[in-house]
Image (cartoon, coloured by chain):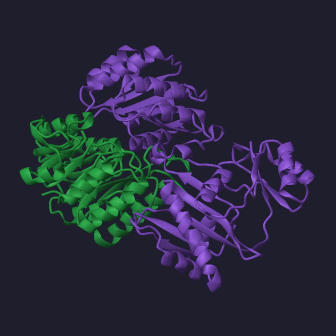
Chain colours: A purple, B green
């Protein structure tokens, strides 16, 4: 789950990391008032959306007066940044930046450990740095039980070339960022840039966090940060029903049991000249309830012109799955053609039941993909 | 021969009195797997699928000599179940459970490694050596004995490929699902090493998907260490970046982990990569022929 910058900053602040305290505005009036309350200096108006590249898109502006803050907010609110509509802006005081750094915590999959990364190239796209100048990123793998040792955090500070009297301050922030990541079950915790101010203080000028969906059950305070405006309503509804759903741009709806097979099914549709409208994993059993729910999700998309159901029955009997599909169709009105691929024990009986109900039922995924692409065009 | 499980497997089922545990314990027994016992705290004295139930893994190991354990307990209790199995001296632990938080698995993985045990999964279908032992949730009847070693990050997609292989007359030495999570106990590289060393395996199928770099690591390993022919399939050519495709580990992030990268890495290592699961048998036959 992703959160906004201002929410990530609140989480970091709660774990003792100095952040640039600001306030969120949803109207130009509010932005002006916040700027006035912040005093006479420069303020930054920052679009709050779940996507990167806000700066390049014009979603971050500096303002030298409350009036300018109002104008900047008016320009940014309602802006579309990579398909995300800006509904909130963060108004923060300008900072006196002496030096910028990058600090991030993420899972290192190959090592199966948590990785803490620091770079002297702060404020820029870290993925670009990783690609083009990997030697500029310094890394420490945290101990899987004990976490990031103080000496490891100091090593990062020394590797950045910090003066000796700044290393401990940096190390404290690195350890706290690791601790935040661990305590909140984050999948990413990033400060970019982390700045050293003219006065010699550390300050997190930007913050980005995402959280492990599988751990949200033990973090109600993080779950409460979810912004429904930033999420696809159908994807949210699917999750509540135990279905994995991702909206895509094509016109062939897919209903599949198993994530890997669901991806392979999308690929098969594409291979046969079609475009998948969605990724959808109904889970193992493919019961009537789940299939009915899946039909509801897929048909909610007006672009869908045909539906491919791909069920590898396995232990679940094909005739039971077929009954489930028929039952689901009795509850949900589906106006587009449906092609079913069904295999497993009693699959033949299942296909017979489906054919009786007027559905096209075939034996292999490739055959089904070819059929569904044809019926979408027809 | 085969890898990891065979007729000498003495299987323990953790969570055996639960809905999933009891159903699959019965299925495994019906397949012919030697299920020697089960564990459910407080379940001592019960019998499930003909197997005695114990309160602790330690008790079960002492009484039954179990040498493999399979875990069907809910996500929030599964890490503890893995620790319990490893600490009771079980050398091979298979965790089926889906949805374990990543930050729980990091210390589990370290503990398993330090103990010298092997973990398969979590979020995996398990493994099967056809005709000898089924340790997982896969449909046994689609498998056949034969020379193909298969390793996959997926569940039903694996069944799809196995089914195509069996229909083409290509049986399996062992078929292994390593799991779809970001932190898993056994990687492609581990499995490839085992198949390379197994005299009963003549060719290997690797089924990957988007996310992470395990397939790229596998490609490097194949180029340097694998002499047997390898055929691959990668799911998710059409998956968009930044979206988790069901499996917690199946996400293209920061522009890396794409199917295209994985396919080109495997092809560069001499792996024949299929465009569809149904092409796998043909590519294998061609590879085996020379």
Q: Quadrant of residue B54?
A: top left
Q: Is residue B163 left or right of residue A140?
A: left
At a point 59% along the width and 42% down the height, the residue shown is A226
Q: Is residue A373 above or below residue A211?
A: above
Q: Is residue A285 above or below residue A174?
A: above
Q: Is residue B1 above or below residue B248?
A: below
Q: Nearer the viewer, residue B236 or A9?
A: A9
Q: Is residue A187 left or right of residue B87?
A: right
Q: Is residue B155 left or right of residue A125?
A: left
Residue A297: image x %, image y %? 52, 28
Q: Is residue A277 above or below residue B207?
A: above
Q: What is the quadrant of the C terminus of chain B in the image?
A: bottom left
Residue A288: image x %, image y %? 38, 22
At a point 24% along the width and 25% down the height, the residue shown is A346
Q: What is the quadrant of the N terminus of chain B in the image?
A: bottom left
Residue A301: image x %, image y %? 59, 29
Q: Quadrant of residue B169?
A: top left
Residue A136 seen anywhere in this rendered image of the structure: no
Q: Is residue B30 left or right of residue B215?
A: left
Q: Nearer the viewer, residue B234 or B254?
A: B254
Residue A67: image x %, image y %? 92, 51
At a point 45% along the width and 34% down the height, the residue shown is A243
Q: Looking at the image, which residue sits at the far bottom?
A: A164
């Amino acid at each position: 789950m992703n959160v906004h910058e201002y929410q990530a900053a609140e989480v970091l602040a709660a774990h003792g990391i100095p952040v640039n305290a600001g306030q969120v505005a949803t109207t130009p009036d509010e932005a002006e008032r916040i700027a006035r309350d912040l005093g006479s200096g420069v303020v930054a108006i920052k679009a709050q959306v779940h996507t990167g590249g806000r700066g390049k898109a014009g979603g971050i502006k500096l303002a030298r007066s409350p009036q300018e803050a109002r104008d900047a907010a008016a320009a940014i609110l309602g802006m579309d940044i990579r398909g995300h509509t800006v509904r909130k802006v963060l108004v923060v005081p300008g900072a006196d930046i002496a030096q910028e750094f990058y600090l991030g915590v993420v899972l290192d999959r190959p090592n199966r450990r948590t990785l803490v990364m620091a770079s002297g190239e702060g404020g820029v796209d870290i993925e670009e740095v990783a690609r083009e100048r990997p030697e500029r990123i310094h890394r420490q793998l945290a101990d899987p039980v004990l976490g990031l040792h103080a000496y490891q955090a100091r090593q990062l500070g020394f590797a950045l070339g910090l003066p000796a009297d700044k290393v401990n301050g940096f190390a404290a922030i690195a350890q706290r960022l690791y601790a935040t990541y661990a305590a909140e079950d984050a999948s990413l915790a990033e400060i970019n840039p982390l700045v050293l101010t003219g006065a010699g203080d550390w300050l997190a000028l930007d913050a980005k966090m995402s959280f492990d969906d599988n751990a949200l059950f033990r973090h109600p305070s993080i779950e409460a940060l979810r912004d429904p405006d930033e999420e696809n309503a159908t994807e949210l509804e699917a999750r509540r029903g135990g279905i994995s759903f991702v909206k895509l741009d094509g016109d062939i709806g897919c209903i599949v049991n198993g994530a890997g097979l669901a991806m392979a099914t999308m690929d098969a549709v594409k291979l046969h000249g079609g475009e998948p409208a969605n990724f959808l994993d109904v889970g193992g059993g493919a019961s009537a309830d789940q299939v009915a729910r899946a039909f509801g999700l897929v048909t909610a998309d007006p672009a869908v012109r045909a539906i491919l159901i791909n069920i590898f029955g396995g232990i679940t009997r094909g005739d039971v799955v077929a009954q489930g599909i028929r039952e689901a169709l009795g509850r949900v009105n589906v106006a587009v053609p449906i092609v079913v691929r069904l295999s497993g024990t009693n699959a033949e009986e299942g296909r017979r039941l489906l054919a009786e109900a007027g559905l096209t039922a075939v034996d292999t995924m490739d055959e089904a993909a070819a059929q569904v692409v044809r019926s979408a065009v027809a | 021969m085969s890898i990891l499980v065979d007729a000498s497997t003495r299987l323990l089922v953790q969570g055996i009195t639960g809905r999933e545990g009891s159903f699959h314990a019965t299925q495994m027994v019906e397949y012919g797997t030697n299920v020697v016992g089960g564990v459910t705290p407080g379940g001592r004295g019960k019998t499930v699928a003909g197997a005695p139930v114990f309160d602790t893994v330690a008790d079960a190991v002492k009484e039954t000599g179990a040498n493999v354990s399979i875990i069907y307990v809910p996500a929030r209790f599964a890490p503890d179940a893995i620790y319990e199995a490893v600490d009771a001296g079980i050398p091979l632990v298979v965790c089926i459970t889906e949805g374990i938080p990543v930050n729980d698995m990091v210390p589990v993985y370290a503990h398993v490694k330090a103990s010298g045990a092997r973990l398969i999964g979590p979020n995996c279908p398990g493994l099967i050596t056809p005709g000898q032992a089924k340790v997982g949730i896969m449909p046994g009847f689609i498998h056949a004995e034969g020379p193909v070693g298969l390793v996959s990050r997926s569940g039903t997609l694996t069944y799809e490929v196995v089914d195509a292989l069996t229909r083409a007359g290509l049986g399996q030495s062992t078929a292994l699902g390593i799991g779809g999570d970001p932190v898993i106990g056994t990687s492609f590289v581990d499995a490839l090493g085992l198949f390379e060393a197994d005299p009963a395996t003549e060719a290997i199928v690797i089924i990957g998907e988007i996310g992470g770099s395990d397939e790229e690591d596998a490609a490097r390993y194949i180029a340097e260490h694998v002499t047997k022919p390898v055929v691959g399939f990668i799911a998710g050519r059409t998956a968009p970046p930044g979206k988790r495709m069901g499996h917690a580990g199946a996400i293209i992030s920061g522009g890396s982990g794409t199917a295209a990268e994985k396919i080109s890495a495997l092809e560069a290592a001499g792996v024949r990569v299929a465009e569809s699961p149904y092409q796998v048998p043909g590519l294998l036959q061609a590879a085996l022929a020379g």
